[in-house]
Amino acid sequence: MQLKRRISAMLISAALGVNAVAHAEQTLTAQDAKNFVDNAQQEIEKLQYPAAQAAWVYSTYINQDSAAVAAYLEERLMSRAAEIAKESAKFNDVEVDADTRRKLDLMRYGLTMPAPADAKASERLSAIGAELQGMYGSGKYCRSEDECFRLTNMSNMMANERDHELLLEIWKGWRDVAPPMKSLYTEQVKIANSGAKELGFDDVSQIWRGGYDMPADDFANELDRLWGQVKPLYNALHCHVRAELGEQYGTDVVPQDKPIPAHLLGNMWAQSWGNIYDIVKPEEKLDVIDVTKALETHGYDEIKMVKQAESFFSSLGFAPLPETFWERSQFKQPADRDVVCHASAWDLDDKDDLRIKMCIQKTGEEFGVIHHELGHNYYQRAYKDQPLLYRGSANDGFHEAIGDTIALSITPKYLKQIGLTDTIPDESNDVGMLLKMALDKIAFVPFGLLVDQWRWRVFSGEITPENYNTAWWELREKYQGVMAPVARPSDAFDPGAKYHVPGNTPYTRYFLAHILQFQFHRELCKIAGDKGPIHRCSIYGSEKAGKALNEMLEMGKSKPWQEALATLTGKEQMDATAIMDYFAPLKTWLDKQNQNRQCGW
Ligand code: X8Z
Ligand code: ZN
């Protein structure tokens, strides 16, 4: 039976000043809904391509003209997408098939910053978005009139310098880019919230929390559950790292009963700590392959690093990247102009115009990021034949997890296979490798969680502009046990110094990805027939694993993510037990190290 929704012609004609009685009542059918979805997809597709091209130009060539063009085309796309999403409500009570209903829902939940109907407000929203991106991309810290640093520079210093006063200077210096962002950000939140209200939501956070094929509150509980699974391992890692940093810098710089000062963890945002492995590594001499050194010794340049990553995907049975990928991507930071260096992967035409945009550093860390970005590209290509609304990640964590999953296979065994090392260290060395990995992956987990805990509350109004910065640091302390190294000035806007805030990219996806990648890896290793411990497994060369992965990727967003997950893993729940399996030997080791230490903050 078909439920029909009647649009009273009265309202429409009243607006037009026509006699309502002259109009017959209009009846909407399931077929109307289908047509509406088809037309919407076609229309959006046409607006999307030029907007993507302009965004590419802007990101790789920041100036006021490229900003204006990008903002203009973005506004046309976003305002039309919001109109369509609003219009889709007319099918709320029409009985339609599950596929059409899913597409109608995706229209509403797909808008991260919904444009309001008011043209001026909508234009302003796009202009602010572009301006914030540009401020971040062109941000610099100048120590004096003729000594300025770009973020790439400063990130390298945070990774390699060991003088805590210098680290503090750089840490504070980068954060000076953010205070001018605060009023723009506040305005952006306000406008986007009004757009969300027009769509029937209370505020933007409802959209961000609601797009996970489950009620928003259940999703929030899922996050807590997953974090609860990882927390004991995180706490053990935190305890060990704080103790070792105390040895390195003195306990007056690193008090042993407080959160760790944020400038000492080897990363501008203290989000992953692999760069301080040398400070916290085990006392016994362990053989841990230094990938940065190996790349250097073997003459890897930026392109060779990308080619090597491509060949991993090829070994799984994925087709090589198109010629245009090599022609159009940005691999290196241009010397003479500002670009957005933050790594990203692009699909400009949903056919084969795949690109990455990076400012590649020749390090092991960046070798991982290249795999991360290519994971996005191969996913994009795998679902390109889906209808527009299904060309996307099963849930947004999947997209962020694919390349990382592959990078988990960059094991000593793999490095030997590709000639980057001569010997595979035996298992007695594993704790070193696992500690390095945990510094990158486990340290990240609470950071991945807290960024949107902050933003959700900003959108809902629970955190007001006066409290933006203090609330940020409260969350940093609560989840990460990391604190601001110095009192922050009253105009500080430290969240703005993290790309995804001015860039307006939701962040919970990275938290999910850090759980999912271990789940995927464990499963793919099983499929590849690897019988050893999963931290030693590499799926390199396993077409069987590649095929299983591809089956999930091809689905795009066409089914609830639980189904996509089950396609690969047989289970519908995200689950951090794979992390526990992976790091089991390290947990034992950490607990031993921490035996006589006072942990916690
Ligand atoms: O932003 C990224 C990727 C691009 S999607 C490089 N990541 C997060 C970050 O850098 O903050 C990857 C891990 C977390
Ligand atoms: Zn990514």
Image: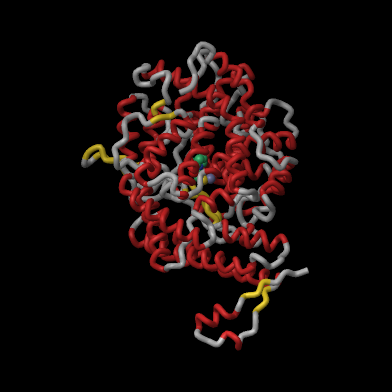
Using the rendered image of the protein, determine whether residue 332 is visible from the camera's viewpoint: no
Residue at (54, 32) in percent of width and height: 441
Query: Which quadrant of the structure image shows residue 236?
Result: top right
Residue at (47, 60) in percent of width and height: 195
- Residue 297 screen position, x and y as percent: 49, 30
In which quadrant of the rendered image does the N terminus lie?
bottom right
Query: Of all residues shown, which one is farthest toward the top?
Result: 596
On screen, residue 152 versus residue 522, left or right, reads: left
Up the image or down, 249 lies above or below 367; here it is above
Q: How many marks?
A: 0
Query: Of all residues shown, which one is farthest toward the left?
Result: 145
Towards the viewer: 435 or 560: 560
Query: Which quadrant of the structure image shows residue 96?
Result: bottom right
- Residue 71 screen position, x and y as percent: 41, 62
Scheme of colours in the image: secondary structure
- Residue 362 screen position, x and y as percent: 46, 37
Using the rendered image of the protein, determine whether residue 456 is visible from the camera's viewpoint: yes
On screen, residue 235 versus residue 178, left or right, reads: right
Towards the viewer: 224 or 585: 224
Residue at (60, 33) in percent of width and height: 410
Residue at (43, 19) in percent of width and height: 257
Query: Of all residues shown, which one is farthest toward the right?
Result: 1
In which quadrant of the rendered image does the C terminus lie?
top left
- Residue 512 screen position, x and y as percent: 58, 40
Up the image or down, 162 lies above or below 594; here it is below
